[in-house]
Amino acid sequence: MSETRDPLAAHATVPSWHHPPPNPYNPHAWIVGEPDIGPGCWIGAFTLIDGSGGLTIGAGCDISAGAQIYSHSTVRRVVSDGEAEIERLATRIGDHVHVGAGAIILMGADIGHHSIVGAGAVVPESTVIPPWSVAVGVPVRILEDAARKYSIRKRDQPPPERSAR
């Protein structure tokens, strides 16, 4: 006769560092550093939010499942056999930006308000995406002013007052 095992017993021996640190957005999101995340943001499961080099996410943003937002890079350190330091560069996401599932935003990117980063897109280091743009593909192709079609405001109306983000 086989012995019945408690499947949660093994979980009790897993060290605490093996899990994402607690955060107020999603228990399955990994948030590093101290990013400035605006009010009304939704962050999906299995996301990585890297605030170690400075990260601002504006109000009302949706960061979909599996997205990765970076403010650092270890490439130069690794390729230089450890002679170079880890590079850090602040990343900014404006108000009311939608980041699609599995999108990757690299350090130094600046994404304008009311923009859309498509699912699976890769935003290269230091890319500037203007407000109301749609960014899709690998690397991203920026379609300026293309996000306005998703707004319920009439096209001739200016956007509402925004925060200083």
Image (cartoon, helix red, strand yellow):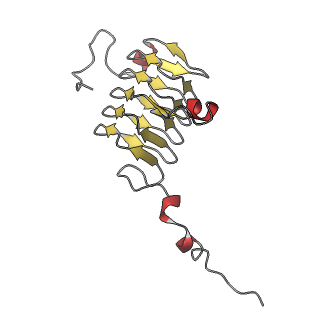
Q: Is residue 86 above or below residue 165?
A: below
Residue at the top extreme of this rendering:
156
At x 31%, y 19%, the residue is: 153
**Which quadrant of the view contains residue 62?**
top left
Furthest residue to the front? 83
Where residue 154 sits, quadrant-wise, is top left
Give how far across and how far down residue 14 sits, in percent.
55, 68
Kindly identify the residue that appears in the image at 48 percent across and 64 percent down. Answer: 16
Vertical comparison of 42 with 127: above or below: below
In this figure, what is the number of numbered marks?
A: 0
Q: Quadrant of the N terminus?
A: bottom right
Image coordinates of residue 28 in percent, x first then y, are 48, 53
Quarter of the picture holding the C terminus = top left
- Left or right position of 153 against 149: left
Question: In the rendered view, would you say 90 is above or below 16?
Answer: above
Q: Position of residue 156 (x, y in %)?
A: 30, 8
Name the quadrant containing residue 78: top right
Q: Which residue is located at x 71 percent, y 87 percent?
A: 3
Which residue extends farthest right?
1
Above-or-below relation of 156 to 137:
above
Could you tell me which residue is drawn at 52 percent across and 38 percent down? 67
Q: Position of residue 9 (x, y in %)?
A: 58, 77
Most distant residue in the bottom direction: 1
